[in-house]
Image (cartoon, rainbow, N blue to C red):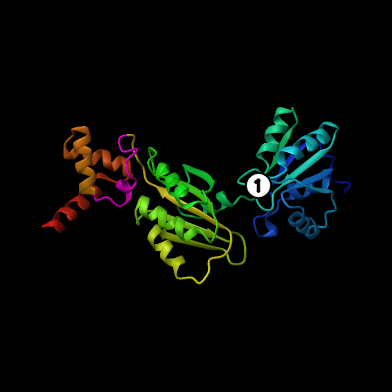
């Protein structure tokens, strides 16, 4: 250990590592990796590449989804005996859609200090460059792999009440992204604001922004879709009054039909229905009124 790096106190250090560009590792992360007694890794082979790049020689041990609970008791025992142990995933922040959360839970229950060493995270990195709302956002990790389960999950998500538009972030596999975008288009409508962030921080980093229909069309013409993918959508506001109804009501259903539905459900006049709908969709009342008039004119 270099002389200018003080010894670490015993504890479990959650160390974020780069998600692509090795230059994104923090100075503090390097200091911790050099100073700990042992590094628990999602994949020891992957972590060894990182350690070799930064000339760090350290004992490693596997800690992945299949052995995390059994490994936890061993690591916690080491820490209680005075060791400092780092936990890393293959890329990004451990325990976020990666192994680590069960180890953290067990460590806290055992009274072991848990110290986060912040750094790269694909969800936040994609959010800040997406152009979608950042005041309210929700990260939901990987979507269900089975098509039916995924559609049911998305339908329930679309029906949840939201006071304001909210960005929802998912991780998705490249071979499923087109099916997922198709499901989202059917549930929310083709005009839903959508961003696909691919290969973040790497040479071929790409952001595809537009409506869900546009993003799906852009990807559909490619021979092959590769790389790590983060999917972001801007879920429209949905009041408790409209919750439980098909999500198309906020994205593809005509304004005139939404006004009619609100008048029928609530016994209110058109002016009040416009006001409520404007709040639900986070749009101006005058904008909705103009769209309503255009729809009526098109029927004549």
SS assignment at label 1: loop
On the rendered structure, is 20 left or right of 218? right
Magenta-drawn segment: 241-254
Q: Position of residue 50 (x, y in %)?
A: 75, 57
Residue closest to the eye, 86 or 78: 78
Q: Residues within 10 Å of mark 1 (few under 14, many from 20)?
A: many
Q: Is residue 154 part of the magenta span, yes or no?
A: no
Q: Position of residue 134 (x, y in %)?
A: 48, 46
- Number of callouts in the render? 1
Q: Position of residue 156 (x, y in %)?
A: 41, 42
Name the quadrant containing residue 280: top left
Q: Residue at x 49, y 59 (%)?
A: 177
On the rendered structure, is 236 left or right of 51? left
Up/down of 261 relative to 130, above or below? above
Q: Position of residue 254 (x, y in %)?
A: 24, 51
Q: Mark 1 highlights which residue?
A: 93
The residue lying furthest to the left in this view is 300
Q: Is residue 247 part of the magenta span, yes or no?
A: yes
């Amino acid at each position: 250990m270099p002389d200018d790096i003080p010894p670490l106190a015993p504890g479990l250090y959650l160390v974020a590592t780069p998600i692509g560009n090795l230059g994104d590792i923090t100075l503090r992360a390097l200091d911790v990796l050099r100073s700990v007694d042992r590094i628990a890794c999602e994949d020891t082979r992957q972590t060894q590449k990182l350690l070799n790049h930064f000339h760090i020689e350290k004992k490693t041990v596997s800690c992945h989804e299949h052995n995390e609970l059994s490994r936890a008791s061993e690591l916690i025992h080491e820490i209680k005996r005075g060791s400092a142990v780092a936990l890393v995933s293959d890329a990004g922040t451990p325990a976020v859609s990666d192994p680590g959360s069960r180890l953290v839970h067990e460590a806290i229950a055992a009274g072991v200090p848990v110290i986060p060493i912040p750094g790269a995270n694909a969800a936040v990195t994609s959010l800040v460059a997406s152009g979608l709302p950042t005041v309210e956002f929700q990260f939901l990790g990987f979507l269900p792999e089975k098509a039916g389960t995924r559609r049911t999950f998305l339908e329930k998500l679309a029906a949840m009440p939201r006071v304001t538009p909210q960005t929802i972030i998912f991780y998705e596999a490249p071979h499923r992204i087109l099916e997922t975008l198709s499901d989202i288009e059917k549930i929310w409508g083709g005009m839903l604001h959508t961003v696909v962030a691919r290969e973040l921080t790497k040479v071929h980093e790409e952001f595809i922004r537009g409506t869900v229909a546009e993003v799906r069309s852009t990807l559909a013409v490619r021979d092959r879709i590769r790389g790590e993918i983060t999917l972001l959508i801007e879920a429209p506001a949905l009041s408790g009054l409209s919750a439980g109804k098909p999500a198309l009501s906020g994205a593809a259903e005509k304004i005139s039909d939404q006004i009619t539905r609100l008048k029928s459900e609530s016994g209110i006049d058109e002016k009040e229905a416009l006001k409520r709908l404007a709040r639900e969709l986070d749009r101006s009342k005058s904008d909705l009124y103009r769209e309503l008039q255009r729809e009526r004119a098109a029927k004549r």
